[in-house]
Amino acid sequence: MPFRMAVALCMILGAELARAQDVFPLSEDPGLKALVEEALERSPVVRRAQLQAAAARERVAQAEALPDPTLSLGYEYGGRGLEPGADDDTGARVAVSQPLPGSGKRRLAAAVAEKDAARLDHAVARARLSLVYGLRLAYAQLLLAGENLALLDEQERAVRDIEELTRTRYGVGLAEQADVLRAQAELARLVQMRAHEEGLRVSAVATLNRLAARPAGAGVTPTVRLRDLDPSATRVPSLEDVVRLSNGLSPDVEAGLAQVERAEASLAAARRETKPDFVASASYLNRGSTPGRFSLDLGIVLPLHKSKRQERKVAEATALLKAEQADCEAMMLEVRAVAERSRADLEAAVRESAAYAGGVLAADALATESALAGFRAGRQPFVAVLDAQRAWDQDRARHAELLYHVLRHSARLDAWLAEE
């Protein structure tokens, strides 16, 4: 009882926070929402989980049904002749027998099947959440690749301007040939980086198409840019909320609880097995011209070997119940730990990205502009311009990566905590 009460309390506390739970900044983005809706409708993974749950529901009625009766046909010979009626015991016989499980056994069997179905219902929720997480992650990867490609465009324009200025200064003897070659090498490096990011963009689109069950090569055009994401607007739940939500809304925890309830029903069914079952049978003997003979029997299946069978089954079910309780507790701890880590990672990404946007990038831009002005005036060497430009480019790429991590960790947090 303490175990079930603790889980029930967690679920009640988690339900109070359910509506405010979704922290993914782009959850209302129209492009992503359309992809999610399409994927949830067409995904074979979700459809498989739904069909498995539907199949489990069909097993509930089967478990509660009576065992099938047995119909048997035969011929009895009394010893005086083969013709029906040659004596009182000669004739064609038809018999029907019906096993009758003891009181409550069918109900408990149905309860076990019902808990199996409930567990698979939670598996459907997990499949849907995992699909949404995969879509959000791939969408974030697509945004990151697009942002990096846009940064490469800007870098290429800036380096070309620097290369042209260096070439001009070299022509009048104010720069070294090595400076021109280094600028050209920087342009060649950008070509390699572009090929890498293009590959990442294609990979992200392929993942989105796979998850949404779309045709190969179908295009995905984001409706937002990563740089437009405001990390300060991202809601980071408190640690207290995360702990409550982790054990109150996770379908993994709910599936574990359903498995515990199934083990409890199995234990109750095993205890009921120590009670006897019954068998009802009826037979009719056709003796030709002699009146037929009808018999009705009621048998009882005695659990005479319960010390070796039924009691061992009870012991087995008891051990399995304790194992399922331990497994559910372990799942609760795992979900909580993953949620706590995701929350910590999300908070760190939000803070770091805000720090970059508020100070680092602005300082980099001023440093680059100052170095370029000094180079034009002959006060700064070429290497200072290139180093300043590279530092700015690297910090902008790092900022884009941090924004991606905001999306990634918030999506992961939702995937472990949400309930649809």
Image: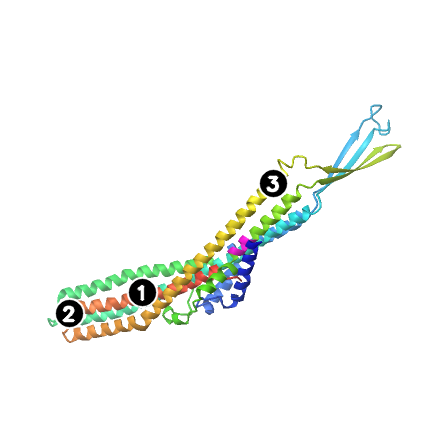
Say which residue label 3 marks: 313
Which is more N-terminal, label 1 or label 2?
Answer: 2
Q: Nearer the viewer, residue 115 or 219?
A: 115
Q: Which mark is residue 398?
A: 1
Which is more N-terminal, label 1 or label 3?
Answer: 3
- The relative height of residue 376 versus residue 63 in the rendered view (above or below) is below
- The relative height of residue 54 versus residue 194 in the rendered view (above or below) is above
Looking at the rendered structure, the secondary structure element under dot 3 is: helix
* Residue type (three-letter) at the residue carrying disc 2: Pro
Q: Which mark is residue 381?
A: 2
**Residue occupying the point 20% across, 65% down:** 183
Q: In which quarter of the image is residue 187?
A: bottom left
Q: Nearer the viewer, residue 216 or 281?
A: 281
Looking at the rendered structure, the secondary structure element under dot 2 is: loop
Which is more N-terminal, label 3 or label 2?
Answer: 3
Looking at the rendered structure, the secondary structure element under dot 1 is: helix
Residue 330, percent from left and from top: 48, 52
Furthest residue in direction top, as rendered: 80
